[in-house]
Image (cartoon, rainbow, N blue to C red):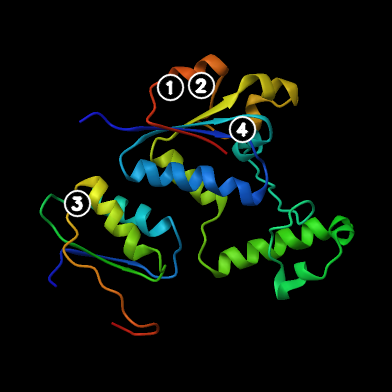
């Protein structure tokens, strides 16, 4: 039986949105899918050697905060200095406590499972990034490269 | 149940129990039995789905009360 194929487009570069692509890709690989993730725009952050991913309560009304703070905290307060850093630190601590894998670990598991990681060359150039900024094993390509694989895939997700 | 290998995925959350199981199964021979312990409450359903999709037979699956030691 031919292996099923999964293609994911990862467009977001925050800590929370880093999870869906890597969780789904690694799990699909464990289910014997061939998997490719195409990283574009802010999704490129997920491929950097040094990850510095953050989560923000700003413009994120669905984000629960410790002690139910989100119910009475004025929106403007979520834009205060250090808010992003504080929420990121708290989120990371919570994830660790609950046994949620780190993005670094999930990414390594994806690579181990031969998930193909493609960085969009146009956005790499747009943001003046260098190939050396990215982890080893990343391939670079454009929209046609994406369709070469996506056109044959059974599932295609835009994240 | 008699098993050839045991995997303790306690404390790990989705998708790690599945990924560890896959890795362990890769190193096992066909016909051998793997016993997995997980505390992620989504695991019961997830392992059922994993077995169906990978052709591994799920011999037995059960939930135990919280803080039970077996």
Q: Is residue A35 left or right of residue A141?
A: left
Kindly identify which numbered label has been placed on residue B56. Answer: 3
Q: Nearer the viewer, mark 4 or mark 3?
A: 3
Disc 1 chain ID: A
Spatial CA span between label 3 and label 1: 28 Å
Kindly identify which numbered label has been placed on residue B46. Answer: none
Spatial CA span between label 2 and label 3: 32 Å
User: How far from the left and from the top, in percent, is residue B3?
Assistant: 15, 67
> Mark 1: which secondary structure?
helix
CB within 8 Å, label 4 to label 3: no
Spatial CA span between label 1 and label 2: 6 Å
Q: Total marks drawn?
A: 4
Kindly identify which numbered label has been placed on residue A149. Answer: 1
Location of mark 4 (residue): A134
Spatial CA span between label 4 and label 2: 19 Å
Q: Is residue A71 left or right of residue A137?
A: right
> Mark 3: which secondary structure?
loop
Q: Nearer the viewer, mark 4 or mark 2?
A: 2
For disc 3, the neighbor class at 10 Å (few under 14, some 14 to 19, many from 20) is some
CB within 8 Å, label 1 to label 2: yes
> Mark 2: which secondary structure?
helix
Spatial CA span between label 4 and label 1: 22 Å
Q: Is residue A131 left or right of residue A83?
A: left
User: How far from the left and from the top, in percent, is residue B20?
Assistant: 35, 56
Residue at 65 percent across and 45 percent down: it is A51
Disc 4 chain ID: A
For disc 1, the neighbor class at 10 Å (few under 14, some 14 to 19, many from 20) is some
């Amino acid at each position: 039986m031919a292996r099923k194929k999964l293609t994911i487009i990862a467009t977001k570069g925050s800590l929370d949105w880093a999870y869906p692509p890597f969780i789904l890709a690694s799990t699909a690989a464990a289910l014997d899918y061939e998997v490719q993730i195409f990283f574009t725009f802010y999704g490129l952050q997920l491929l950097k050697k040094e990850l510095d991913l953050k989560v923000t309560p700003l413009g994120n009304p669905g984000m629960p905060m410790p002690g139910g703070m989100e119910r009475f905290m004025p929106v403007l307060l979520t834009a205060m200095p250090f808010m992003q850093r504080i929420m990121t630190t708290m989120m990371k601590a919570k994830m660790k406590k609950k046994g949620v894998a780190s993005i670094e670990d999930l990414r390594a598991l994806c690579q181990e499972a031969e998930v193909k990681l493609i960085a969009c060359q146009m956005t790499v150039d747009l943001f003046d990034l260098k190939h050396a900024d990215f982890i080893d094993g990343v391939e670079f390509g454009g929209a046609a490269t994406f369709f070469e694989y996506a056109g044959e895939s059974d599932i295609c997700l835009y994240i | 149940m008699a098993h050839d290998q045991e995997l303790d995925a306690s404390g790990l959350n989705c998708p790690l129990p599945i990924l560890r199981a896959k890795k362990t199964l890769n190193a096992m021979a066909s016909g051998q039995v793997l016993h997995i312990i997980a505390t992620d409450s989504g695991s019961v359903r997830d392992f059922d789905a994993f077995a169906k999709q990978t052709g591994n037979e799920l011999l037995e699956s059960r939930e135990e009360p919280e803080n039970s030691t077996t």
